[in-house]
Amino acid sequence: MKKIGLLVAFLLIFPLVFAIELKVTKQISEEVLVLGVENPAVFNIQIKNSGQTDDFEFFNLLGFSMAPKGTTRIKQGETANIELIIYPRQDFQSRGFYNFNYYIRSASNKGTIPEVAILKIVDLKDAFEIGVKEFDPESEKVKVYIKNKEDFNFKEMSAEFSSVFFKDKEEFTLDSKEEKEFEFKFNYEDFKKINAGFYTLTADIAVGKNKTKIEGIINFKENQNIKTTKESSGWIVNIQTIKKENLGNLNYLTQITAKKNIISRLFTTLSPSPDNSERKGIFVEYIWEREIKPSENIKIEITTNWTLPLVIIGLIVVLVLFIKKYQKTDVVVKKSINFVHSKNGEFALKVSLIVNAKKYLEKVNLVDRLPQLVKVHSQFGGQSPVRVSEEKRRIEWNLEKLEAGEIRTFSYIIYSKVGFLGKFALPTATLIYEREGQLRDAQSNQVFFMAEPHGRDEE
């Protein structure tokens, strides 16, 4: 009779089980439901309605709150994306993987179909793991980790870590399967007398308004007390110092290593010399091995001097810039002077202008300016000028063209019956020309002469 009653109840609840034509596709195979946290488990499912347009309701018989609430309309032939939400039930006893049975019912009473969602149900305290990554009494630092073991995102959480060595609090978030590390400082003097052994590390965790407590282990081992210090100073001349001190009471065999690439090693000196070196790709690893007795230390000094390579690079850059500038130059005009001995002992200078055409030039006009108080001798070297104006203090030459690579020299003599004393500058000469239909100009260098009571010389 009991079995018949159950069958009747099932038929009343699920009439015409196969009357609705729905195809349910699960996008995510399992979700985590953390008890003690308000965040629900969320499943993304697709429902294709091969039957008539209808409204559908989602429910379960286990007392879990679900969403969507009410009914959801799915038209004939439509595929609907549904976000199925299952809220945690704090009094639920099962843990681990659980087949969560839920049902989709037609609002027009065309039937009900059963579906299964795979849940992983865990307590809040079982979702985390804590421990020590690194515990170094010499540096007075400890690295503690907390790991999220589940595929669940924890937001706005905090943990207060405590042990006999330290106590500190951190606020953070933990995404799915994420592990975070925290570094805490402590005073080694405070627990010098603590015996070696295993000590408890606890974490009071708060996720929103929900709290739990978990434990881990700290393994406090006996250590030789070796203090290591590293210093680096300078950029062009970089000096790295590595020092290890034995502050304990046992002999300690230590190894110090340093790496340099194949370029920097050429400008590096090591003191003292390493015991061994190994080539690893583009790096060279230097190794020092020493036994340090109590109260002794080993100090390694690595000096890399970049002065020479920087000077070489600077010279290369200057040379490249000079070459580029030279290649862009159309013409170079060089001016020079030489003293001339005259019969009457007059002051006289021979002025030479050398025009070196780097490219083809047309309608070339060379103009030089004459200093005050001098006259131009009637004899000229090379091509004679087209115009000499002592009034305007100008002397000019005209050329039809200059071929690329062509060099022309022009010279003239200036003299004066007035004596000079001191250092004087001659004006620069100007070359005006056409290049590819554009009017351009170039200036010569400036020259100086020194007039002294007992002789003259060019500068």
Image: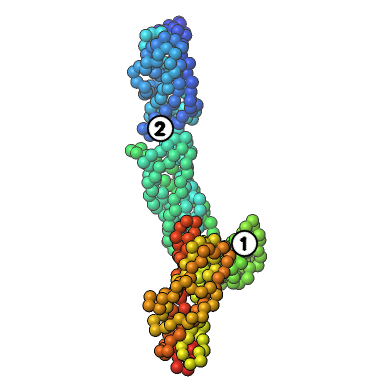
Three-letter residue code for mark 2: Leu
As helix, strand or loop, the secondary structure at mark 2 comes to strand
Residue of label 2:
35
Query: Where residue 16 appears, x then y in whole percent?
Result: 44, 7
Q: Residue extending furthest bottom?
A: 454
Query: Where residue 23 appears, x then y in whole percent?
Result: 48, 16
Mark 2 or 1: the one toward you:
1
Q: Can the viewer see residue 309?
A: no
Residue of label 1:
262
Residue sitting nearer the eye, 253 or 320: 320
Placement of 210 over or under 49, stated as above or below? below
Query: Where residue 335 appears, x then y in whole percent?
Result: 50, 75
CA distance separating discs 2 and 1: 58 Å
Residue sitting nearer the eye, 302 or 312: 312
Query: Looking at the figure, which quarter contains the N terminus?
Result: top left
Of marks 2 and 1, which one's residue comes earlier in the chain? Answer: 2
